Amino acid sequence: MDEFSEEEKAQLRPFVTNMDKPVFALTNLPEVVKGALFSRYSRSSKSLRRVLLDEFMLSEELGLKEMMKDAPRERKDKDLVQTKKAEEFYERVLVGYGDDSVAELAGAHIALEGISIMATKIVEDARIGLSPLEKSTRYVYFDNKDQDGKWRFQREKTIMQSEFKELYEKTCDHCFETYASLIPKISGFVMERVPQDDKTSERAYKSAIRAKTCDILRGLLPASTKTNMGFFGDGRAFEYLITRMYADDLAEIRELASSMQNELSYAIPSFVRRASDKYGQSMQGYFRKTRKDMGKTIANPKFLGASGGEGVSLVDYDKDAERKVLIAALYPLLQKPAEEIGKIVDRMGADEKAEIIKSYINERGNRRHRPGRAFEHAYYTFDICANFGAYRDLHRHRILTQQRQELTPYLGFKMPPEIVEAGYESEFNGVMEQAKDAYAQIAAKHRAQAQYVVPLAYNIRWYMMLNLREAYQMLELRSSMQGHSDYRDVAKKMFLEIGKVHPRLAGGMIFMDMKGYQLERLESEKRIDMRLEEIAKRKVDDERRIAYG
């Protein structure tokens, strides 16, 4: 451990969480300074605290001494100036001590409010280095209007400047009007079907009823519905995301890219600058040209039309997966090359292979006990067609590869059985038919933009390629009781397909929930009640200890 004088400790304390432990966090530093600091640290024999003190604290360019003198509330007006100084310093450090990977050491939080559900999917397509959190359609009613009295949906610029403006607004209005009018009716229907019992609190019951009502009705919301989301990501990921967004066909996405770059330039300016400089523009051109040329390719009549419908198909899998998993499971335990281990596996009998797989999966206490990395050697590719609402939930899994087709009304839609049972089938069908007709008219001239008018109940097709380890994580999570029935069905079907081709490998997924439920969120809400009671009890106990010493 380094020795620091009392004066040096006083200088460092505002920027590190402790002075005497080998593990500590950085505080009160601009993101660009953190990135530059780690860059220099990776090429220095000094400790991080010593690098910070000797090469950063003593730098007049950074102004860290000035930062230290100011109280937090007094620093606010100086943040921009100090970030600018840090940015200029970082540029010089980057040239001498780092490369683009340093941008992964500085991150930022950003909020995107009032954007469309369609936009969230495009932004969330970026999987690596970014962590999104999106407003849920399961727990929040989307029945509020803006201050001007209009329903809260994205008025897409291209459509609003076209002859389809009135048709678009009328169709989206109808979606929201039907959604809002059915909330009390469906809520009452669910309460009638599943009355509250003595063991369920009022809070838990109401929350479960709200979630079920949202689940049943969310298919009526159009893809244009405004929502909110938050992002945490590193500099490199944000730069690539913004560059790609600038090249998008949709005006909302391009405008969002500009807004994001502008706001992130206050926190991590050096890391997002290239999204729109000559390098970024070159990359944008590449994206546009690729999309344009592929558009010409599919203009051939043989590619036209929509076919197929709702379902889950395992279209490709590794026939040699079990062998690869066995080799990978044994590899870290032996002192032999993989090729030789493979020959040993080939000489094993079925029972011996089964025993190794059983030992590797071992006794899983809960779904978070997942098998190790050997299971990453088995891959599966699924072709899935399900409603857009279910896709939104499954899309957020990032440790896999997936791509979707355009959202259209030509693959059918999923009507919740509760809608039929409650007697509101005609209202639901009315929304779907009007949206389908509006889409057809708008898509004739503005195909990409027409997606905004399609409700979440309509099916979309996408493929999903994932390894077995991720399958354990995703399928057990998405089949759990509290999940939406639509994506629970997809998860259960994927599990059954894997089980058909690799029964021993899938046999460890013991936390798959294959049952059906009437009120999916109820047990989860009861567990929340228990936790709330525990928190309240701890608070009372703490107050007593303080009161009586």
Image (cartoon, helix red, strand yellow):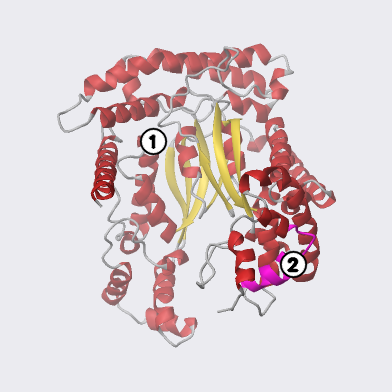
* Quadrant showing the N terminus: bottom right
* Residue at the (42%, 28%) spot, across then down: 414
Q: Which residues are magenta?
A: 48-63
71 vs 409, nearest the viewer: 71
- Please name the amino acid that badge 2 sits on: Leu
Q: Is residue 227 above or below residue 33?
A: above
- Please name the amino acid that badge 1 sits on: Asp
Main SS class of the magenta portion in the image: helix
* Residue at the (60%, 51%) spot, across then down: 233
Q: Which residue is mark 1?
A: 486
The extreme bottom residue here reads 335
Whether residue 409 appears in this view of the structure is yes
Distance from Cα at disc 2 to Cα at disc 1: 59 Å
* Residue at the (28%, 45%) spot, across then down: 543
Q: Is residue 294 above or below residue 345?
A: above
Q: Is residue 527 left or right of residue 403?
A: left
Q: Which residue is mark 2?
A: 58
* Residue at the (44%, 68%) spot, across then down: 373
Q: Which mark is residue 197?
A: none
Image position, residue 366 (x, y; %) = 29, 57
> Which comes sooner in the sequence, label 2 or label 1?
2
Is residue 61 in the magenta section? yes
403 vs 479, nearest the viewer: 479
Is residue 92 in the magenta section? no
Q: Is residue 143 left or right of residue 279?
A: left
